[in-house]
Image (cartoon, rainbow, N blue to C red):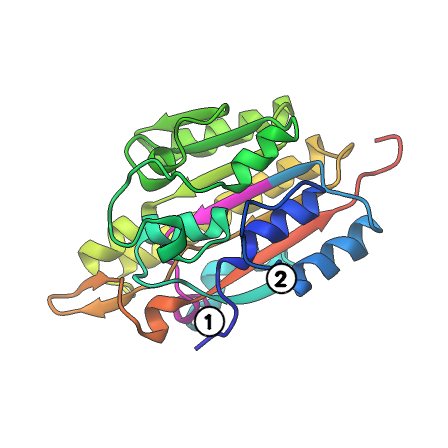
Amino acid sequence: MNTTSLDVVAASLCRIMGIEAPAKAAAPSPAMLEYADTVFEGAAADRVLMYNPDAIGQWIFEKYPTLFKEAVARTELQLPLRSPMPSVTPVCFASMYSGLQPEEHGIQKYEKPTLQAETVFDTAIRAGKKVAIVAYHTCTISKIFRERDMEYFTYGTLEEVHAKVAELIINDTYDLIVVHAWNYDSVMHKFGPESVEALSEARVNSEAYALLDALVQTYWTKHNVFMGFAMDHGCHEIGGDCGSHGLDMPEDLNIVHLYKAYKKKIGG
Ligand SMILES: [Zn+2]
């Protein structure tokens, strides 16, 4: 089982952006800070793009490397992490963006209340940053981080989500953009984690991330950029050729985040 909890991400992103971490957030990941410090030469990131593909476990990532070759080609730091329990979407995203364990942030089962705990979004807004979430209408990320002074762009299809993120990168007005890609998760539940239906959805995420990366390299050259391909939890196969997650097992808890930083080009 991976030893570093997913909760390190919140304080890491804040430190990398040069802003306060959420209250009582777990200590940042030394690997993330060291990597960002090396690329930015001690400066902060002024653009962060988090692409969150749902439910792609470490075992899927490692067993099918060709499906992730586009994302891996755009990665300089691979960070193995352990999802909190129960390993379901609202619990995990609440930990990822608050830096707290479930008993501290309050979402301890599959439910989507507005998270009361302080998050990366709150400290970013307080620091004057513009924040956007781009997600499915009713998904966790579009629900649990509501009631904050930020933009929520929600759609019914993944294509619209990707198109909106592309537009936001080109327009270059948001400092922190979080994207939820739910496609692998929803197909995995129905057909199983290793079905051709689910695996082809994982490939969609890798290719979309590569496209967004290409836009970042074209339109965000004036910025120090930190970006990630960052899962919430893994998954396992259950009877009837279906998939599930939520249990205390390596397939559900072990994930790998892929990170990349781009230093701004002088005069760019
Ligand atoms: Zn999930």
Where's residue 208, x and y in %?
49, 43
Q: Amino acid at mark 2?
A: Ser
Residue drawn at x 46%, y 27% is 148
Q: Does the segment drawn in magenta span residue 44?
A: no
Q: Is residue 115 left or right of residue 263?
A: left
Percent of width and height locating residue 36: 73, 53
How crowded is the residue under tag 2: few (<14 C-alpha within 10 Å), some, or many (20+)?
Answer: many
Answer above or below: position of 79 versus 140. below
Q: Could you tell me how far apart the alpha carbons at marks 1 and 2 are, in whole angstroms?
A: 22 Å
Residue 127 occupies which quadrant of the picture? top right
Residue 175 versus residue 28 in the image, above or below: above
Q: In the figure, residue 32 lies in which quadrant?
A: bottom right
Tag 2 or tag 1, which sits nearer the N-term?
2
Q: Residue at x 34, y 27 (%)?
A: 155
Q: Amino acid at mark 1?
A: Glu
Q: Is the CB atom of the residue marked by disc 1 within 8 angstroms of ligand 1's nearest atom?
A: no
Identified at 33% across, 46% down, the residue is: 183
* Residue neighbourhood size for the residue with mark 1, other residues' Cα within 10 Å, grouped as few (<14), some (14–19), many (≥20): few
Q: Nearer the viewer, residue 155 or 9?
A: 9
Residue that label 1 marks: 62
Q: Which residue is under mark 2?
A: 29
